[in-house]
């Protein structure tokens, strides 16, 4: 693995002898306040869809104040950063670069919220975190067909920043019904569990019914989130072909949290693996690695921390005509449609 790269330094000129940042109000802990704190900040840490962030308004004095504060924060030690974060009742865990990013975004949000009210109704109400487990063999030969054997969903409430509910069902594979010893050892899923499971179309129908009961896409806006591109672009795509059903519309767009994390914290791609992201944020993995549900819960923990740090997680990938495509950060923020069972292929 390549050596870690240091966070890119800001290249804007810093004023001489900057003064310490002014005291800011401690964050309010109501659900609405928590939502307001991250509802207007993009993966790159810049506020979107607001007049204050348009290029023509960067001459506003508020941005000079933000730049001066950033310069001061850049020269703070890790202990000073933790002390200041604790003063504002913010999370103090994480490596130094993460702490700097957290404190900078806190001051920036405070300044921008003073300048104008943020639109608190623009963000998703829920994020559905999905991390499939699929059949596999050691070495994964190119001709091997990966089939989903665990379908978990973790429902993250973006207002409360808490995991509100979970779904988990195992799936009986069709092409390779007998699991390899490698797959059993990796996932912890046994042959007996798989033999008793439903086929994928029935499990997908159960997922959709679970989502409907929670009024996703009707009363509440939501989007999907994965750790990487493969869950949707490869595993779900292949599974739908194997099961002879069309690709579900609610899963055609999603947040790839690896991209969001790399863009927001300015880290290289090789520093966006699940365990590394947790470590850099001052957390450790909770549960059994390669359990789909446990992986999804840990991904949700990362998403929560990013939202707390001021990142507006946005859809950044999609499936179009069977191909994986990138979604621009400037695209309108749209929730996923109400889930519906896809039709069978002809």
Image (cartoon, rainbow, N blue to C red):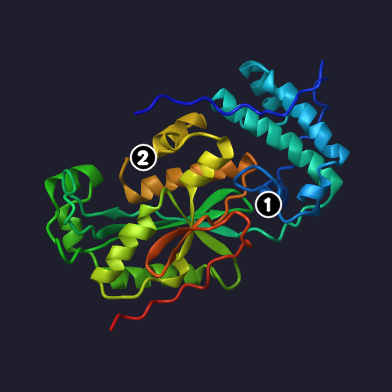
Where's residue 295, x and y in %?
38, 45
The reply, left or right, for residue 224 in relation to residue 33 is left
Residue 219 disc label: none
Q: Residue at x 71, y 61 (%)?
A: 121
Seen at 40% across and 38% down, the residue is 273
Q: Residue at x 13, y 50 (%)?
A: 180
- Whether residue 298 appears in this view of the structure is yes
Crowd rating for badge 1 (residues with CA inside 10 Å; few <14, some 14–19, many 20+): many
For residue 114, what is the image quadrant?
top right
Q: Is residue 227 left or right of residue 113?
A: left
Given the current orientation, which residue lies at the most extreme right position? 61
Residue at 16% x, 65% y is: 175
Image quadrant holding the C terminus, namely bottom left
> In the rendered image, which residue does mark 1 sit on?
39
- The percent position of residue 90, horizontal first and vertical second, equals 66, 33
Residue 89, placed above or below residue 141? above
Closer to the camera in the image, 133 or 1: 1
Q: Does residue 186 appear left or right of residue 180 in this picture?
A: right
The answer to whether residue 27 is visible is no
**Of the residues under marks 1 and 2, which one precedes in the sequence?**
1
Label 2, secondary structure: give it. Answer: loop
- Nearest-to-viewer mark from 1 and 2: 1
Residue designated by label 2 = 287
Of 249 and 220, the residue lying toward us: 249
Q: Secondary structure at mark 1?
A: loop
Q: Position of residue 123 (x, y in %)?
A: 65, 58
Q: Position of residue 304 (x, y in %)?
A: 56, 44
**Residue 75, placed above or below residue 271:** above
């Amino acid at each position: 693995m390549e050596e870690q790269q240091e966070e890119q330094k800001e290249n804007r000129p810093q004023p001489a002898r900057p003064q310490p940042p002014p005291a800011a109000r401690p964050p309010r802990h109501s659900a609405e306040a928590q939502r307001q704190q991250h509802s207007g900040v993009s993966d790159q840490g810049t506020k979107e869809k607001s007049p204050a962030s348009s290029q023509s308004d960067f001459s506003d004095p508020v941005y000079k104040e933000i730049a001066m504060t950033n310069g001061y924060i850049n020269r703070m030690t890790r202990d000073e950063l933790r002390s200041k974060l604790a003063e504002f009742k913010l999370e103090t865990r994480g490596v130094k670069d993460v702490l700097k990013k957290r404190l900078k975004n806190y001051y920036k949000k405070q300044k921008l919220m003073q300048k104008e009210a943020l639109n608190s109704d623009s963000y998703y109400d829920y994020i559905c975190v999905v991390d499939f487990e699929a059949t596999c063999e050691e070495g994964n030969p190119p001709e091997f067909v990966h089939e989903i054997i665990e379908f978990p969903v973790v429902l993250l409430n973006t207002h409360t920043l808490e995991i509100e509910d979970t779904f988990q069902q195992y799936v009986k594979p069709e092409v390779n019904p007998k699991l390899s010893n490698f797959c059993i050892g990796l996932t912890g899923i046994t042959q007996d569990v798989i033999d008793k499971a439903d086929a994928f179309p029935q499990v997908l129908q159960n997922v959709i019914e679970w989502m409907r009961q929670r009024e996703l896409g009707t009363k509440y806006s939501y989007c999907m989130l994965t750790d990487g591109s493969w869950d949707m672009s490869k595993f779900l795509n292949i599974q739908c072909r194997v099961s002879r059903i069309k690709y579900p519309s609610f899963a055609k767009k999603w947040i790839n949290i690896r991209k969001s994390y790399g863009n927001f914290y300015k880290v290289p791609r090789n520093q966006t693996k699940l365990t590394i992201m947790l470590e850099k944020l001052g957390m450790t993995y909770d549960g059994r690695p390669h359990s789909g549900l446990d992986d999804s819960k840990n991904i949700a923990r990362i998403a929560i921390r990013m939202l707390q740090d001021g990142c507006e997680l946005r859809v950044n990938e999609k499936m179009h005509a069977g191909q994986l495509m990138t979604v621009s950060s400037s695209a309108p923020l749209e929730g996923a449609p109400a889930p519906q069972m896809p039709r069978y292929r002809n």
